Structure formats: C-alpha cells, structure tokens
Image (cartoon, helix red, strand yellow):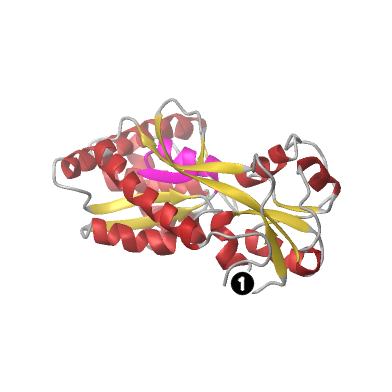
Amino acid sequence: MSNVTLKQFRYFEALARHGHFGRAADACAISQPALSMQIKELEDALGTPLFERGPRQVRLTSFGEAFGQRVRDILRSVDELTDLARAAGDGLVGRLRLGVIPTVAPYLLPRLIGDLGRAYPGIDLHVRETLTPRLLEELSEGRLDAAILALPVAEPALQEEPLFEEEFVLVRPRADAHRPVPDGETLLRMRLLLLEEGHCFRDQALAFCNVHSGLPRDGLDGSSLATLVQLVGAGVGVTLIPEMAVPVETRSAPVAVARFARPRPSRTIGMVWRRSSPLAAQLATMAEVVRRSGEALRSAGAVTDGQAPE
C-alpha cells in the first residue's frame, strides 16, 4: 500500500463512476492506456482485482465496492482540506463546482455567471447541469460544492437556503388565447405535455392537477421545455413552464401564455450545500448573489395573460 497515490484514487473513482475506461480517461483528461496502467498498478499494490473487465464495460468486484466507499470518503476529506484553506481567506476564490437543474440552468446561468464573476473575481466556476437525484448524489459524495434546485430536498446532511418563488404559467396555441384558463382538474383532461420521468418539474405540474406522478396518463413527454413549447406551437397540446423560461422558450413559437387563477402553481428555487462543508459561510453569502440574480431575471421576464413578452 505504500505506493498508492491520491491520483490513483481519483482515477479509480472515475472508472467506478463511468464503468468504461474511455469515458473515465476523458473525465480525467488522460489517455486510456495511462488510466489502465494506473488502475493495474493500484490493483497490484492492493493484491486483488478492483474491477471485472467486460467487452463493453467494467464492474466493481465485491472488494472494489467496499474499497470505493473508503476512497470516496478519503477524496471528500482531501477536498474539504482544500476548502478549509480557501475558507480561511476572504470571499470565494478558486474552483467552485455548482450543480443546477435543467429547468433553471438555461435561464438563470447566463445572468448568474456574470453576477458571480463581479462579486467574486477570483472564482473559477465549474457548472454541472443534471437532474435533482444526481445533483444530490454528487453533493453527498463531495463532487459538487453546491446546487441550485427546487426545494425542499429533505436531506438532513444538506443545508437548504430558499432563494425565490417562481410561478408556473400555461402555454397553449395562440389560437386558444381567448379561451378561459383551465384549472388543474380541467387541465388534466386536455392533452397535457410534460417533461419525462425524473424531472422534479413534472411532479410539480402533476401535483397542480392533483395527480400522483406514478399514475399512467395519456400525453406526450419531452426531454426539455423547449421541445414541449414547440409541440404546443404545432398544435399538439398544452403545457406548463416556469415563468423564468418564458422569454427564452416562447420567442420562436406561435403560442400564448396565461396565468392561472389563485392559488397559482409555483415552486421554491433554492441553493443547497453540505452542512459539513468548510465553505458553508461563503456559500451562504453567495446564495444572496444567486437570489438577486433570480429576482432580477423574474422581474425582467414577468408576463401578463396573452402573448409572451418580446
């Protein structure tokens, strides 16, 4: 074990996560032969295989599973030592790994990146866009410093900071703009287009219709809000989108936007991070920057019933 290095631990973790030498090598920015050699040297030092090699993918051995948990703990502790040194300075400097859900990222990030750069000139922002379950997993494993998503997440190890409330609006074909705005139950009887399973926004939209997300339904699912809005413009059905998305997603589609009657469907956007993070105080301050960015974006994109703003 005396020849085992942290670099090998990071290579091991990447291979365990990707299950493929090529993808793991790309993630580590090294060649595949170099990664293979490092993994082989690690296994030789341990005296036992860590992976089962298959023609298309690799799998952890039973020992590799147990070893992997210890490695993740070690790497998380090493990263927290680095964060501890950063926390001793003034403000946020260096690398910051921020996760964002897909129904927020395209709309908030263009403004937020500039605002964070002005507030923290020394920050090196690395953004990860993916679904909430993956963000929470990567936060707990120390691969992300913080995430912006819909609250609550109800994870005891995570600090939740609510940032702003955002309403959902109805998007329908422009020809239907004069029709009454349906309530949740009426909406469900229409052809309601939703994001595919795994998106928390899908569950929130179904909750407005008073339907459990696991029940079967007659409708089309899309992988992005952009797809849903374009389908509405083509006359396929209707959909709900967060107000933040209106200026971007409706500008090239023949659709009309309408608000629902009160109480309107909405979500709370917040920022979360590990309670144990040495950067917790700095991240709480950074959350205020995110809050201001989100509120400014919502004000700029506020809509009234009818056609979306230019």
Callout 1, which amino acid?
Answer: Arg
Q: As rendered, which of 23 and 221 lies closer to the eye?
A: 221
Could you say where residue 305 lies in the image, as x and y percent from the top left? Answer: 66, 59
Q: Is residue 144 visible?
A: no
What kind of element bears circle 1? Answer: loop
Could you say where residue 278 lies in the image, as x and y percent from the top left? Answer: 24, 36
Read off the magenta span: 131-149
Please tell me whether residue 141 belongs to the stretch shown in magenta. Answer: yes
Q: Residue furthest top?
A: 156
Q: Is residue 168 visible?
A: yes
Please tell me whether residue 266 belongs to the stretch shown in magenta. Answer: no
- For residue 85, above or below residue 115: above
Could you say where residue 172 lies in the image, as x and y percent from the top left? Answer: 75, 61
Could you say where residue 267 lies in the image, as x and y percent from the top left? Answer: 56, 42
Q: Looking at the image, which residue is at 45% across and 38% down?
A: 49
Quarter of the image for residue 243 reads bottom right
Q: Looking at the image, which residue is at 36% across and 56% down?
A: 126
